[in-house]
Image (cartoon, helix red, strand yellow):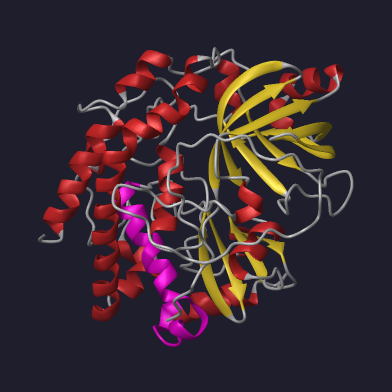
Amino acid sequence: MIFKNTVRIIAAALIAVFALSLFACNNGPSADTGDVTAAPGELPSSAAAYDGLFSSMMEINVTVPTADLAAMLKSPDDETYYQATVFVNGMKCSTAGIKTRGNTTFVSEAESEKYSFKIQFGKYQKGVKINGLDELYLNNMSYDPSCVREYLAYLCFAELDAEAPLAAFAKLTVNGEYYGVYLAVEGVDDSFLKRAFGDNDGTLYKSQKGAALTEFDASAFSVKNGDDKGLKNISALIKALSSGEGVEDILDVSAVLKYAAIAACLGLEDSYLGPKSENYYLYDEDGMLEIVPWDLKLSFGTDGALRKTGYAIKSSLITASVAEPYFDVLATERPLVSKLLENEEYLKEYKGYAKDIAGFLQRCEEYLPKLKTTVSEAVKADTRSFYGFEAFEAEFTDGENTLLGFIKARRANILTQLGE
């Protein structure tokens, strides 16, 4: 097993919203300075990455030619890139490309223009980045009245020192119009690989729907970075999982156990462990495959079946099994995790991570009032919000269908299952 000393800084407070210094678009790398431990009641962050880009509420201003913006909003399912000038915390990039992404049909049906977006800073001039960052995703949080669930889910990976994208809240303005509060998420691309692994020399595989690793299917993965077009590493992993031999030689076992524990404890049905078996990457670093999470929006009790018509906690996620972390699928259908948990040593390690997550949930409960303050004004001013300010405020109160209520109930249930 490989335990990585990832490069992170734990911020003293997540709610600080300071004005960042102004810089021009640049290609330079950003440097972190080492690991420290979060103090009691605090949550993890990575303040130093990309020169602090993700350390506070981002201010993002996008300018797109009027005709291009109209075309993008008229046909959002096309996901066509348009050239834009983008300011991030005052840093200008005139070579960016922007496109709509995600649940575009729902947004259109809701008669809203608050789509999710993807920004590539070097789309129209190769190599251009902002503070070393090349891709930024802006998630509209249409599934979450609290606006903080996915953010907390990414922080949970940081809590376990597991590689995952960075995230921060952002106030988005397009052509001078306030589009509302978004979650800005680091793209899993070259700059992520350099930050997380030190280089981007390995192969990055992106899962498609049905990437269960039960049998070789070239259509289940796409190669986003690297040369393994034939998916030889994926084939080798599937064979190792099937035979039960040599898994440790090609897989970072601890990373998978952390991923599984977080998915189980936070109710990540929209993951490898769910019915669709998607929303993850595998990265080949020096012959070892490591799992990287993606798209954590359906977390902290979110019922994916209801999110387009309303919001309610899925009660079964409060009591979801920790020992059997599979959502509406059999263990044999998810061998990447089930084969590992057959090993007593790995099962013990996995349960240790689950206990760590219970501690993280305790700090989340303590931190929610401050986190609410961080995003409150931006949410209140968001006329495109899918749920409104009253629903936002309710999420931070105790109850059966609130974020706070889920955190408290799920933490207690996890500890009960672990015999704590």
In this orientation, which residue lies closer to the viewer: 232 or 168? Answer: 168
Task: Name the side, left or right, on which 135 lies relative to 300.
Answer: right
Residue 226 visible (yes or no): yes
Quadrant, the C terminus: bottom left
Q: Residue at x 53, y 14 (%)?
A: 381
Measuring from the top left, give residue 264's x and y in whole percent: 31, 54
Q: Residue at x 77, y 33 (%)?
A: 86
In this orientation, which residue lies closer to the viewer: 139 or 39? Answer: 39
Measuring from the top left, give residue 373's x and y in whole percent: 41, 27
Quadrant, the N terminus: bottom left
Dominant SS type (magenta) = helix
Residue farthest to the right?
A: 125
250 is within the stretch colored magenta: yes
In this orientation, which residue lies closer to the viewer: 170 or 139? Answer: 170
Q: Residue at x 63, y 41 (%)?
A: 137
323 is within the stretch colored magenta: no
- Place residue 181 in its image quadrant: top right
Task: Name the side, left or right, on which 361 lies relative to 78.
Answer: left
Measuring from the top left, give residue 408's x and y in whole percent: 20, 40
Q: Which residues are magenta?
A: 241-267
Count of marks, rendered view: 0
- Place residue 100 in its image quadrant: top right
* 57 vs 327: above or below: above
* 41 vs 311: above or below: below
* 321 vs 89: above or below: below
Q: Residue at x 39, y 57 (%)?
A: 159
Measuring from the top left, give residue 294's x and y in whole percent: 52, 51
- Place residue 257 in its image quadrant: bottom left
Residue 79 visible (yes or no): no
